[in-house]
């Protein structure tokens, strides 16, 4: 028997606070008049007991109010982020760049 709570799937974009992560939910739909595909996204503050990291794909479920802006809880982690990082501010997942080789210095003479 399942409950009737809303469930959404998104990607963790930030995890700086204690037991709180920011999850971005992307949605796309066709505009009714112009028939153009419109993409929009919304960020939710989500209660996290599972230790999610940026880049993890999670399913969140609606819950009672936990704080002023937190009304969602991480239900399951669908996919863990591997050694990828999330670009600051954009929320896009990017691969880490290899460290550059040290520059050679010429001998003083």
Image (cartoon, rainbow, N blue to C red):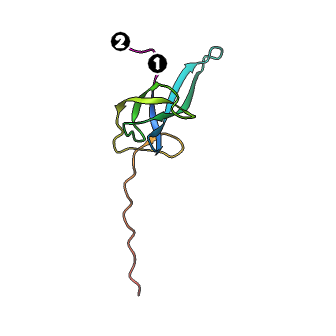
Q: How many marks?
A: 2
The answer to whether marks 2 and 1 mark residues whose Cβ atoms lie closer than 8 Å is no
In the rendered view, does 58 fall on the left or right side of 41? left
Q: Is residue 11 magenta?
A: no
Image location of residue 100, percent across then percent down: 39, 60
Task: Label 2, secondary structure: give it.
Answer: loop
Image location of residue 105, percent across then percent down: 39, 75
Q: Quadrant of the N terminus?
A: top left
Image location of residue 14, percent across then percent down: 48, 42
Q: Residue at x 40, y 32 (%)?
A: 57
Q: Residue furthest bottom?
A: 109
Q: Residue furthest right?
A: 33
Determine the CA span between mark 2 and mark 1: 12 Å
Location of mark 2 (residue): 1
Q: Which mark is residue 79?
A: none
Task: Give, as a single range, the part of the protein colored magenta.
Answer: 1-8
- Residue 29, by quadrant, is top right
Q: Residue at x 66, y 14 (%)?
A: 33
Q: Is residue 6 magenta?
A: yes
Image location of residue 11, percent across then percent down: 44, 34
Q: Is residue 84 above or below residue 11?
A: below
Location of mark 1 (residue): 5
Closer-to-camera residue (52/55): 52
Q: How packed is label 2: few (under 14 Cα within 10 Å), some, or many (20 or more)? A: few
Q: Would you say the magenta stretch is mainly helix, strand or loop?
A: loop
In the rendered view, does 80 fall on the left or right side of 60? left
Q: Residue at x 38, y 82 (%)?
A: 107
Closer-to-camera residue (89/104): 89
Q: Residue at x 37, y 67 (%)?
A: 102
């Amino acid at each position: 028997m399942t409950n009737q709570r809303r469930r959404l799937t998104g990607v963790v974009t930030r995890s700086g606070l204690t037991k709180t992560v920011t999850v971005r939910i992307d949605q796309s739909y066709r505009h009714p008049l112009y028939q153009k595909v419109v993409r929009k996204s919304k960020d939710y503050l989500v209660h996290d007991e599972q230790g999610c990291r940026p880049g993890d794909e999670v399913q969140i479920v609606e819950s009672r109010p936990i704080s002023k802006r937190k009304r969602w809880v991480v239900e399951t982690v669908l996919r863990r982020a591997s050694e990828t990082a999330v670009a600051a501010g954009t929320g896009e997942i990017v691969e880490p760049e290899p460290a550059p080789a040290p520059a050679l210095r010429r001998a003083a003479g």
